[in-house]
Amino acid sequence: MKIKITLLVIFLSCIAAGIYTWNIPTRNQDTVRVDIKPGSSLSAVARQWQSDGWLVSADLLKLQAKLLKKEHVLRAGEFDIPASLTGPKLLAFLASAKPVSYKVQFIEGTTLTQAIESLKKAKSLKQDVQPLTHTTIAQLIGLQGNPEGWLYPDTYVYHSGEAVSSIILQSYQRMKKVLQQEWQNKASNLPYSTPYDALVMASIVEKETGAAHERPQIAGVFVRRLQKNMRLETDPTIIYGLGDSFDGNLKKKHLRDRSNKYNSYRHKGLPPSPIAFAGRSAIHAALHPQDGKTLYFVAKGDGSHYFSATLAEHNKAVRKYQIFRRKKEYRSAPQTN
């Protein structure tokens, strides 16, 4: 009888030990981030996690995976492992968890140069385009000339190890789609030969105002100036053409510089390329400009503009609002010299 009791105790102890061992939690008291590379095996990553100190036993996890038929649960990516998971719960987590995601943002009114800097600094983004420049981006998306304006401004989500080229191509395809959709529904009698012309105009509208409700008015002014064969005379185009040499102070010599192809005070028509990223609302405004007679506008100093139909009215408005003019990044109204 004593032998039976002893055997029962041993049996129950073994069961208890087995249950305890089966449910041993991981040692991490806080979330731990792991980076699972493509093609990694459970055996390899378990050994690494044991070496890192937060997994109790790689062999135990492999045994649990085999018994639970979860030997192939691994997916590539970064994952935040919650604290104190048992082996079965860890395997279930690995089978269903979403990888850690990152974001990179292209902002309306900023330039490709600024986007390139954001892409270079983006965490865990594979830099597969080297060097990352205007030229290599143009080659990637299959364009000749300046690729400025061809990336759609938005927030792009990616996972660790994703290629910078995939973000660029995704953004480019998005811009082509939006531009084509807007072009198909454009207003009539516009001074554009191609959708690209509209994109160039949209970039100017984007730079001239941050007030969404003003975009159709701004577009209306510039469209009417093109239709009347007037120069656009807008500061942002000059500033773009100056590039890194612009120190924040637009001078008379800049306005007179005919060698600057983006100098809309000296060259008629649209500039050679967009000057910034244009969002959908700016593209829509360029293709649906507000009707009217206004040909001039001046910044009022509060983020909005005063619109005028005649030069005399415009000059009066300039005198009224010039006290608010900013010496840096000031966006002036078109003027007639």
Image (tube, helix red, strand yellow):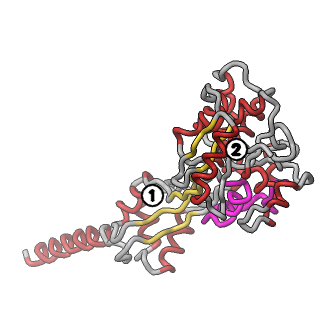
The quarter of the displayed image where residue 285 is located: top right
The residue type indicated by label 1 comes to Leu
What is the magenta range?
Answer: 110-136
Q: Which residue is nearer to you in this view: 106 or 122?
A: 106
Pointer 1: what residue? 94
User: Does residue 179 appear to the left or right of 6 in the view shown?
Assistant: right
The residue that appears at 61% across and 25% down in the rendered structure is 291
Quick one: label 2 or label 1, which is nearer the N terminus?
1
Q: Residue at x 60, y 50 (%)?
A: 299
Q: Left or right: 321 with respect to 65?
A: right
- Name the residue rendered at 69%, 55% in the picture: 163
Element on which disc 2 rests: helix
**Location of residue 304 in the rendering, given as x and y in whole percent from the top left corner:** 54, 47
Please state which of the two labelled residues, at mark 2 or mark 1, is closer to the viewer: 2
Compared with 195, 163 (above or below) is below
Residue matched to label 2? 204
Q: Is residue 269 left or right of residue 301?
A: right
